[in-house]
Amino acid sequence: MSLEFDSQGVFIVEKRFLSLVQIQNRKHHIEQRIIRVRDEIAELRLKIGSEEKKLQGLELELKQLSTPEVNAYIMKLQKERAEAHAKALSLMQEVLGKELFSGLQDKKWCSFTAKDGGFYKITSQGYVFRRINNEWKKLCIIRPKELPLPDFVLSALINVRENPKKYNLRYRR
Amino acid sequence: MIKVKRICSLGHEETEYSLEEARKVLAEGQGRYLIVKDNKIVNAASLEDGDEIVLVPKLQGG
């Protein structure tokens, strides 16, 4: 055992004798480790190759989805959607009347009594609830694809008010 | 004339029909739409000239 010191500190350096068997074992152990590490590197290289292919595919798809034609199409759809939303809001106000409409806009919900005499609530996000034993239970109503939200809210309110028993409670699985 | 606003995908369509045409159109869409006039459900037979109605899609429950 000897002492060494440098800028990092003072160290005890120990020497250990290796017998013939220990030398052979150590050599064998190192050879096995070298084989394992080489295998791991080969696997990683394969994985890198496959991930690089995936990356190239994703970059190509993103490039295709970022062409001026696609961007113009997206803008057109967004404009149409915004116009449909504004039209739907104005129709909702027209059908529901100012009071109910403002309730939905300001409070984000409004309550109503349906044909079955039950008490219901609808939110501005289109969720409808039935009052059961002083608790609001959510109903399950399917929103048709592409129907603007205000149109869905209006439709849900009118449908539930007219045929409340048609809609079941939503149960969490 | 009857002014009909139909709620459908991407906004609503607005069309004017004669009373007779309107009844025919409403009969065709009977199972699919509720007819709303002045925030109340009505039936096609009760429509009168000059009415403005909204056709609301019948929604499915889950």
Image (tube, grey):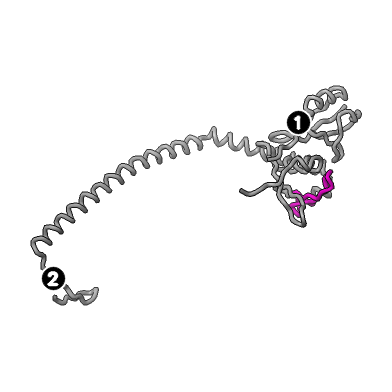
Query: Residue A31: x, y in percent?
Result: 17, 52
| Residue drawn where x is 86% and y is 39% of the image | B40
| Residue drawn where x is 86% and y is 34% of the image | B42
Identify the secondary structure beneath mark 2. loop
Relative to A25, say whether B8 is above or below.
above
Residue hosting label 2: A15
Asked whether A126 falls inside the magenta stretch, the response is: no
User: Which chain is mark 1 on?
Assistant: B
Tell me the CA gap for discs 1 and 2.
91 Å
Q: Which stretch is magenta?
A: A102-122
Q: Can residue A111 be seen in this view?
A: yes
- Nearer the observer, B20 or A75: B20
Residue hosting label 1: B32
Q: Which amino acid does label 2 sit on?
A: Lys
- Nearer the observer, A119 or A93: A119
| Residue drawn where x is 75% and y is 40% of the image | A166
The numbered dot on residue A36 is: none
Relative to A123, say whether A25 is above or below.
below
